[in-house]
Structures are given as structure tokens and as C-alpha cells.
Image (cartoon, rainbow, N blue to C red):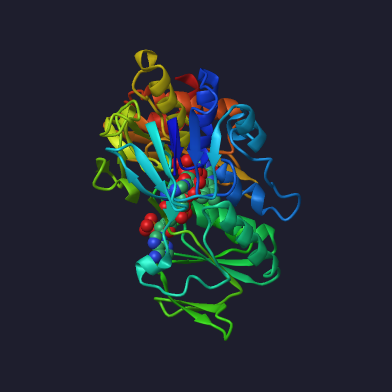
Amino acid sequence: MGRAFVYVILGGGVAAGYAALEFSKRGVSNGELCIISEEPVVPYERPALSKGFLLPEAPARLPAFHTCVGANEERLTPKWYKEHGIELVLGTRVKSADVKRKTLLTATGETISYKILIIATGARALQLEEFGVNGSNAENVCYLRSLADATRLVEVMKSSTGGNAVVIGGGYIGMECAASLVTNKINVTMVFPEAHCMARLFTPKIASYYEDFYKSKGVKFIKGTVLSSFEKDADEKVTAVVLKDKNHLPTDMVVVGIGIRPNTSLFEGQLTLEKGGIKVNGMMQTSNTSVFAVGDVAAFPVKIFGEIRRLEHVDSARKSARHAVAAIMDPSRTFDFDYLPFFYSRIFSLSWQFYGESVGEVVHYGDFSGSTFGGYWVSKGYLVGSFLEGGTKEEYEAIAKATRLKPVVEDITELERQGLGFAVAV
Ligand code: FAD
Ligand code: NDP
């Protein structure tokens, strides 16, 4: 049994949705394109799962956040794919790939062949078991990557109202879920190994602003330690979390956000890997010319840093996907991907954006006791990264533009004095 397509997108997440839109804009014919996804729904904006989806009042639900609403583009509903002659193979995992033969074998036993393949398999959440802690399959321990995870998290939250939650991990999932849990009237304790939250991006000063804000909402922080084991009742429900520092935290639920691993396994030994992802060139093309990779799974040259990087953020998933399709459909007029990394988050009433990279010396600016402040990262005499909390649309555009231009910074004290004005004037 088998079907053949010109273009196949493997994975049905953010990158797949944006690639589909780009294909349709560039004129793909009926029946030429197929999307295969393990998830049972058409591509959606995954960031909604830790934000609007978890709201206690009027939560976001599909079809409201199908791609590509997140970039103010058309919303691609199942009807849209049908009208555009795009074949959907949903709820179906691909279990092996043969890059030489250009075929994919699904878990249902179907062989799907392609002329061009776009790998958009994203990533999976790391499990506590991978760090030597057992028992994370308990019904009140939640991970958050897919719609199914988010649906389960909502159910567990509902049964824990007024109770306690332990959030493991101080990264993006930890911070956004902790805020949502509080909004759902659950008492939160966050546990993570670092000295402060968002350790890979935030400086201690920036982190302490957010931690103080969280504390004002009742969140407790236990830092510099990790989980050692769970205590469970007769129904195998977690009743307490035991930490390496011997702290014992009775709890009604646990949320785990300890990082991800890109889904590369189908291609290991067949394509070149780097930085944990599938290595591509500036056209998003892998070591096999018929295969492209985009989104979280792709390690691509970030021109502005002069280095191969793998990014785990929605903006790069959207843009790398569109770039791959441009490179496939119109190679002679497509140049190397030139991407400025962009990360953001919205938590409680707060909202920040970051552009570039967080290396080198940092200067802070603005009012850390108020609502608008930020930081600049300066490396080898150039501005390489900019952070801003509470900015206006124009101010965010200004820090993005300034970071993209990578201006020389002659006097760091002067940069600090000018603050946001520096970016606005660039
Ligand atoms: P994904 O969106 O993960 O899609 C991968 C798809 O491939 C999935 O549908 C998966 O089921 C499928 N798949 C994988 N393997 C197979 C297989 N073998 N067979 C069939 N299908 C397969 N980033 C931000 O910048 N801002 C945010 O606010 C933000 N919020 C987030 C909130 C949450 C809860 C999560 C989990 C992530 C968030 N991110 C955010 C990160 C962002 O969502 C990802 O960077 C983005 O989804 C990556 O897109 P992708 O298409 O590469 O992968
Ligand atoms: P992150 O990498 O952001 O954070 C993981 C956190 O868990 C880090 O603080 C990490 O510490 C800590 N950690 C690692 N191992 C352990 C352990 N054994 N016990 C306790 N803590 C541990 O990953 P997330 O899981 O938060 O996010 C998953 C993905 O979702 C990422 O790709 C992220 O970009 C994406 N996402 C993005 C959002 C956004 O951009 N706004 C929102 C939500 C998700 P250490 O640094 O020491 O490893």
C-alpha cells in the first residue's frame, strides 16, 4: 500500500502550518502536497497552549488558534486544507524514513513517497526519568508539549483548585505554567537547579524583577536543587515531591518543564546532525538535496552570529518554514536565510521581548521598580542582544532594528545612560 506526493511535510506543528501557507501562496497544485502528523488536529499555534489555553475564563480553544493567526495571517482550518487540495494524514506517526529511496513508513503500515521532504518534527519534552527520577507517568504529573498534554493539564488544574502545585523547571514552561496555575487559584512552588529563573537568558537583575513579581502573586521559589523522588498514594497519585535538599513538598499536582530534545531519530545515520538538530544550509537544505529541515529540529547558519544554531522558538519555526518553501519553489530568487533570533513571553500582566544573543557584557536600563526596563548585551565592541519589558510596539521595533544593525558600542557607560534612547536613535 502506498501513495506518492511531490512535497511531503513530516510533522504537523507550527512550521508545517506556515510552510503550507507559503506553498499555497506560491501555487501548489491539488494533491501535490501532503502533511503527516502524529497529532490528530491540523497545525496550530503551539504557544497558545501555555497561555490562552490555560485561562480560567474564556480559554482559547481550537479552531481559534490554528496557524497562521499568530502572525496575523489567514487561519488554516481543516476546511482550508481541503479547499487547497492539501492531503492530511493526521493521528499518524511515521516510524521510519528511507532517505535514499525517498520513502516514509507510517505506523499504520503505509509507505508514502516524496520528491521533496520537509522535516518539521519539532521536539519532545524531556522526561524526569532521563534524569533518574521515576514515576512521572502519574495522573497528576503534567508535561506540556501537545494539545493532548494541555487538555490533560486543564483537567488536572480543575481538580486542584485551591490546592498546591509544584512546578519543576525555571525555564519558559515553568514560568508560563506557574503564572497560569496562580491565575487558576492554585498555590505554586517552583523548583529549579539554577540560582535564578530563566538562567540562560535573564541576568540576575532581570530575573529578580520577575521573581519578585511572582512572589507578590504568592509563588514560592526553591532554587539550587532538583527533584529526588515522588511520594504516591494507593492510586499512584503523587501526594508529595521530595527534593535532593531533603525538602518535602505536599502537593496536588506537578508540572514538569525541564527542556526538550529535537525529534531527529528517524534520520540519524542518514543525514548530518549538528547541535542536536538536523544540519541545514542557508536554504534549509539538509545533507541530502531532496530533504529540508525547519523549526525546532533544524540547526541552521545564523548569519548575524556566523554560527550554526538550533533555536526553539516560534518565530524561527515560522520563518524557517517559509524560507524552505521559497528555496524549494523559487531557488534562483531565494538567498541564504538571514535570521535575527527573537524570543518573547507574556506572563500575568507582563510582557517581554528579546532579540539577538545573550553573550558578553550586559548593561541594564530603565526603571526596575516600575514597568519598563531592559538590557543590552555587548560583545567584542558590538551590540549583540537587546531585552525589553513593557515596551510599546515602536520600542520593540527599535530594539529589533538596533540589534539587527549590530552597531559599535564605544562607551558602555554612555549606552547605559542613553538606555532605550540608544536603540530608538540607531
Ligand atoms: P512543533 O510545533 O513541535 O511540531 C512538530 C510536529 O511534528 C508535532 O505535531 C509532532 O506531533 C509531529 N511529529 C514529530 N515526530 C513525528 C513523527 N515521527 N511522525 C509524525 N509526526 C511527528 N515559542 C515562542 O517563541 N514563544 C512562545 O510563547 C512559545 N510558547 C510555547 C508554549 C508551549 C506550551 C510550547 C510547547 C512551546 C512554545 N514555544 C514558544 C516554542 C514553539 O512552540 C516551538 O518553537 C514551535 O512549535 C516549533 O515548531 P515546529 O513545527 O518545529 O515543531
Ligand atoms: P527550558 O530549556 O526553557 O527550561 C528548562 C528548565 O528546566 C531550565 O531551568 C533547566 O535548567 C531546568 N532543568 C533541567 N533539568 C532539570 C531537572 N532535572 N530538574 C529541575 N529542573 C531542571 O525548557 P522548557 O521545558 O521550559 O521549555 C520547553 C520548550 O518550549 C523550549 O523549547 C522553549 O523554548 C519552549 N517554550 C517557549 C516559550 C516561549 O518562548 N515563550 C514558552 C513555553 C515553551 P538548566 O538550564 O540548568 O538546564
Q: Position of residue 342 (x, y in %)?
A: 46, 35
Q: Quadrant of ligand 2?
A: bottom left
Q: Quadrant of residue 339?
A: top left
Q: Quadrant of residue 215?
A: bottom right
Q: Is residue 422 visible?
A: no
Looking at the rendering, in which quadrant would you find the C terminus? top left
Q: Is residue 111 above or below residue 281?
A: below
Of residue 338 and residue 199, the one placed in the foreground of this image is 338
Of residue 46 and residue 416, the one placed in the foreground of this image is 46
Q: In the image, 253: left or right of 283?
A: right
Of residue 239 and residue 327, the one placed in the foreground of this image is 327
Q: Tally the marks.
A: 0
Q: In the image, 32: left or right of 299?
A: right
Q: In the image, 62: left or right of 250?
A: right
Residue at 46%, 51% in the rendered image: 93
Residue at 36%, 17% in the rendered image: 331
